[in-house]
Image (cartoon, grey):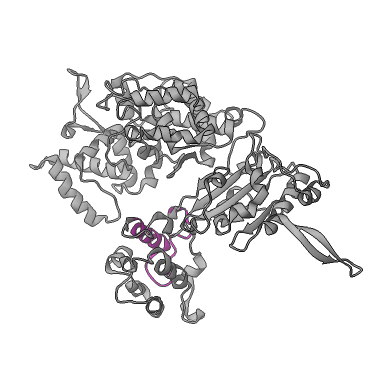
Amino acid sequence: MNELLQRKLAELDALNKLECWYLVKQPTEFSTICYLVFLLKRYKEEKPESSLEQFIADETGTLKSIKPNAKFSTNYRALRVAAFFGLIKLEFIAANNSYRNSYENAEITEVFEEINDRCSGSFEETNLYSDIIQRQIEKMFVSSKIDEQSEDIRSEFRLYPAMLLYKVLIELGLSQGEYRISLNEYRYLVVTTEKFEQYLDTLVLIKLLREDESIITEFNKFGDKFDNRLIQALKQLPTLSIDSQYITLIPEKINEVALKVFAFEQNPQIFNTVEYIDFLCSKVGLFELPNFKRELLSTDATKVVTRQDSYKPLNNDYVDNRKGDNILLYGVPGAGKSHFISKYYCDDYEKFERIVFHPDYMNTDFIGQILPSIDENGVIAYKFTAGAFTRILRKAHLDPSNHYYLIIEEINRGNAPAIFGEIFQLLDRNQAGVSEYAISNNYISKEVYGSDDQPIRIPSNLTLLATMNTADQNVFTLDTAFQRRWQMRMIENDINKCVFKDTHILDTTVSWGHFNTVINDQILSNSRSVTSSEDKRLGSYFINEELLLQDIKLNDNKSMFAEKVLKYLWDDAFKLNRYDLFNENYMSLDSIMRHFNESVGDERFDVLNLDAKELLVKA
């Protein structure tokens, strides 16, 4: 094992539990915390005889009946998180230089009032104040006096965690082409970084750990020490995508983050405790401080992000200007993976080949095969007929000034390692985006280069894009060796971005967006079966707008909504626990379809159980 990694392991072994970036173990969702502050404000104004704890418990019950879709916490101790977010300002005790946990005496800050003004008390509408959420999380400081252990186990920690994480992601993106870290790298290497200036040490350790992934088992021995909640706050940053494996900079946010890191480094700021708390509880952002050189935020992004000619700033058309890569887009069925490819990568038919893997798809379909052909004289000859991979490889080779794409839909519905065969070796790429290792194949060489002995490599202007439904990931398992050669990118299932979310389903009062949200919440909350998981959720584009509006009478008394959506829910998402969603009076899919199609308006949803229907149909 490398000496630096050994030293890091020894350091982790010596650390106290939770000697890392830390946030108290309470709910961290801004909407939930805002509702707690809302109740605290009422408590201070109304001055009831009951304790704050009892008041919050009682009033939360009332709020739940009014807003069944909002998330609440009855634990008044979660107000400590509100202090970390700058929504309340705890009472400072000068005698012992600390902040009192007496929330009754806490001050409601202008940050909370700003949020309240934006959303008029509907705190679950976080889209109305997402910029404030980002501002406040980027201002969080480890470890300020709000942290009860700031002078104890976290006495050496003095940094803005969001800015250090941004710095690490930007530097990794520039040097290795991937703006992401694994959760293990975050947990053991990033959150144990004490000061921003130590980012180089952190980057070196990440590089060394990636060179020998087996070492991670040694780090996992210390997992219990770093079970912290700060990542739950960071998940709310619109600049990051955080899933079960990786923390990734969202492509369209790379320039913004790079500029922030650049400006931050040019403006070192030092706060003592009182000044920092005042700053945290104000509407001033990290880049709005007095004497801060804000003009740096309008610097040409190319000067910031570009370190060498092969790296260029990313924006909506960023992919055509970048090096080749292997990218696997995954998400729930209908999340919009193919749409994402068309929007952010390529919609020019001349610049891509699109194929779909399936159980019968073979290596010869992929690269090509010898097939008989008849020439103009009627003579049968056997010639190599190029497959999709070879065709797009030839196009990219002959046109190096343009970027080309091989799009593989449903990559795990075929035996991907067998289909790729020897091409698997080409998936390892160097920093320029070219295959690090070459292979030999006389037929491909002749077709692409005109010479049957030319070594074959994927060029830097050819990107492989693949899609995978997480609900189907076990159809053909993608082994670790195969997956590690791809940059995994989750396509978030965000119904709010669906352009027809407000379209009503047939003649009902229920919109597609509301139906999608309610059913997906049912799937996520249902833990009685292995089929009830996030992988089974309905994607935002699981159905199109035309089918939502389709007139049943024009289609043999059949609703395509029922055929597509209800059938999926019955046969797949709730297969082993159907009556957690459906009405027990309907014993078969036939009866479900018949009632839905023959009913009118909201009566169609009688096929669902009472709880589900009540959530869908408002009185």
* Residue 294 is at least partly visible in this image: no
Q: Residue at point 49% right, 64% down?
A: 543
Which residues lie in the magenta part? 496-524
Relative to 300, 34 lies left or right: left
Where on the picture, by quarter, is residue 236? top left
The location of residue 136, given as percent across then percent down, is 36, 34
The location of residue 251, given as percent across then percent down, is 54, 41
Task: Look at the image and tell me in which quarter the C terminus lies.
Answer: bottom left
Relative to 8, 254 lies left or right: right
Q: Is residue 501 magenta?
A: yes
Relative to 252, 114 lies left or right: left
Q: Nearer the viewer, residue 28 or 302?
A: 28
**Seen from this angle, which residue lies furthest right?**
377
The location of residue 582, given as percent across then percent down, is 33, 70
Q: Is residue 483 above or below residue 383?
A: above
* Residue 600 is at least partly visible in this image: yes
Relative to 335, 305 lies left or right: right
